[in-house]
Amino acid sequence: MVPKSRTDELREALKPWVFHDAFCAASTEKQYTVRSIYYDNRRFRCYDEKFDGFRLKKKLRIRGYNTEHPDNTVFLEIKRKQEDFIAKSRAPVRWSRIREVFPGYGVGTSALPFEPGTLEAEAAGRFLYNYYRRRMLPVVLVAYEREAFLGRFDPMLRLTFDKNVRSRLYPELGSLYSERDTRFLIPGYFIFEVKFYLNLPFWVRDIARRFDLQRQAFSKYATGIDIHCVEQKHLRGVGHTVEFPDAAPPRSSVLT
């Protein structure tokens, strides 16, 4: 975590080694907003796995960007973490069709909006398998502004400043782009993330020492829940207008 007062100084130190990614470069503010709705079961199993020391952790989320528009693309994502290794699978869905993916919104049993046999359909299938099997519900919305950089000499290196991290408990599916009732997780700080493959570049280590930055784990999901000081998290229901059905018919993944 880095004090906001050092944002410009850290950015300047990184400048010889990195450049903004395409999304930031296209923005006048050199950043974009990341929005995620995380899923868990009624007893917050994913939340508990974080603190119980599970080596392999898995999170389901819907991720979108910037502001709401019917033609936006959002993603059904599974994030897997085993110790320091992180992998993701994601399936893109048009925002105007997101309700067709989930049961209980009055859309019947229409086909899912994925081309069969594609990697996207496979990723959506994995997402929905976990959603049904673990009986998941939307738990917390997390949003932040991201300034992202890529390494000039290492295409596998990605660094991000995640600013104004905020959350809201028990969001509805349609509230992905809403800022209502959000709380800031770490006022006065931003999260500096470094994603790399195999070896961390020496210059990153040097900059970390110069700025006295300590490597630490930080879960936006878990902290986004904790900031609301909710006791007895398994006593759920508030904010959920759609519950998991006791029995749902099989659904096709044919594009319609």
Image (cartoon, grey):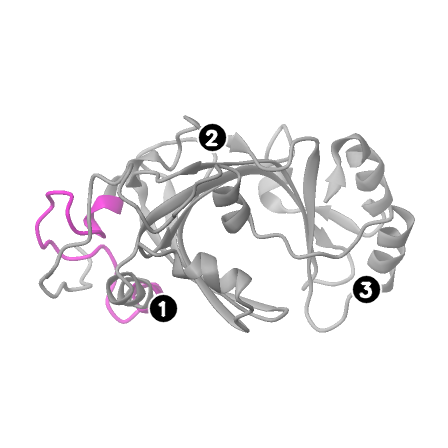
Residue drawn at (77%, 50%) of the image: 18
Residue at numbered disc 2: 182
Query: Most extreme residue toward the front, as rendered?
Result: 232
How much space separates mark 2 and mark 3, taking CA atoms? Answer: 36 Å
- Counting from the top left corner in percent of width and height, residue 74 is at 38, 46
Q: Could you tell me the amino acid type at mark 3?
A: Pro
Frontmost residue, 197 versus 239: 239
Q: Where residue 167 appears, x then y in whole percent?
A: 48, 37
Is 163 a magenta residue? no
33 to 45, vertically: above or below: above
Residue 111 can be seen in this image: yes
Residue segment shown in magenta:
98-124
Q: Is residue 52 above or below residue 213?
A: below
**Which image quadrant: the C terminus?**
bottom left
From the top left corner, tell me how far across and down residue 148 is, in percent.
Answer: 65, 45
Residue drawn at the location 85% of the way across and 48% of the way down: 16
Q: Amino acid at mark 2?
A: Thr
Read off the residue under disc 3: 201
At label 3, counting other C-alpha atoms closer than 10 Å, the crowd grade (few under 14, some 14-19, many 20 or more) is: some
Quadrant into which the N terminus falls = top right
Q: Dot 1: within a 10 Å radius of its alpha carbon, few (fewer than 14), some, or many (20 or more) residues?
A: some
Q: Nearer the viewer, mark 3 or mark 1?
A: 3
Quadrant in the picture for residue 145: top right
Q: Which of 125 and 49 lies nearest the eye of the viewer?
A: 49
